[in-house]
């Protein structure tokens, strides 16, 4: 069992913290859109940005155990993270628009569906393109 956990630690951690980030995203969206009467797309953008910061921190330190400790290394990881997540953000907005405007789904329900789809895709983007590959782009003296 220990071997299984070690092999899939990143997946289990990502799922746990991804669920927390999605919960933050959905709850903040709900509060902004329902209780504070923000436009649903604006509420979605704000909720996404807050969850993005939470996700970067938990992914870097708790999920993918990034060893990049210097400010410049962390900044490069954050930029890489934001670049990849920009496509996720566009997908997020597109799914919300499609769900609400075209399919007439309840906004919070559309947000939950959106989070499941984006969460699955973000795991693979994070694993393959951000936390394991950033070191390839750093000068040799920054890799240690």
Image (cartoon, rainbow, N blue to C red):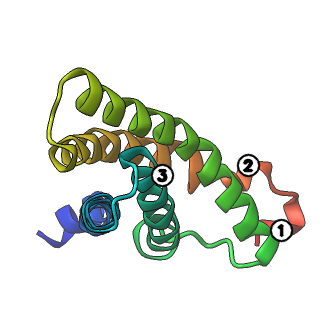
In this view, the residue in front, 103 or 120, is 103
In this view, the residue in front, 58 or 129, is 58
Instruction: Using the image, tell me which numbered label, if any, was put on residue 136.
Output: 2
Q: Earlier in the sequence, mark 3 or mark 2?
A: 3
Q: Nearer the viewer, mark 1 or mark 3?
A: 3
- Mark 3 = which residue? 45
Q: Position of residue 93 (x, y in %)?
A: 42, 37
Q: Position of residue 81 (x, y in %)?
A: 59, 53
Which of the 4 quarters of the picture holds residue 99? top left
Q: Nearer the viewer, mark 3 or mark 2?
A: 3
Q: Residue at x 39, y 57 (%)?
A: 38
Crowding at label 1, few (<14), some or many (≥20) Cα neighbours within 10 Å? few
* Secondary element type, mark 2: helix
Instruction: Using the image, tell me which numbered label, if any, was put on residue 142.
Output: 1
Q: Position of residue 113 (x, y in %)?
A: 20, 41
The answer to whether marks 3 and 2 mark residues whose Cβ atoms lie closer than 8 Å is no
Q: Is residue 35 above or below residue 37?
A: below
Q: Residue at x 45, y 65 (%)?
A: 55
Crowding at label 2, few (<14), some or many (≥20) Cα neighbours within 10 Å? few
Kindly report the distance in space between the C-alpha atoms of the residues bearing marks 1 and 3.
Answer: 34 Å
* Secondary element type, mark 3: helix
Kindly report the distance in space between the C-alpha atoms of the residues bearing marks 3 and 2.
Answer: 31 Å
Residue 34 relative to residue 136: left or right: left
Q: Check the picture and name the quadrant holding the N terminus.
A: bottom left
Kindly report the distance in space between the C-alpha atoms of the residues bearing marks 1 and 2.
Answer: 11 Å
Residue 95 relative to residue 50: left or right: left
């Amino acid at each position: 069992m220990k071997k299984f956990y070690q092999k899939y630690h990143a997946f289990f951690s990502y799922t746990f913290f991804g669920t927390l980030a999605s919960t933050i995203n959905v709850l903040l969206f709900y509060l902004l859109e329902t209780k504070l009467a923000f436009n649903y797309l604006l509420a979605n953008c704000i909720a996404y940005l807050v969850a993005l910061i939470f996700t970067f921190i938990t992914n870097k330190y708790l999920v993918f155990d990034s060893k990049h400790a210097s400010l410049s290394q962390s900044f490069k990881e954050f930029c890489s993270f934001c670049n990849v997540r920009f496509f996720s953000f566009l997908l997020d907005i597109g799914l919300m628009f499609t769900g609400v405007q075209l399919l007439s789904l309840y906004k919070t329900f559309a947000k939950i569906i959106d989070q499941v789809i984006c969460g699955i895709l973000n795991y693979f983007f994070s694993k393959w393109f951000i936390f394991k590959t950033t070191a390839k782009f750093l000068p040799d003296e920054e890799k240690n």
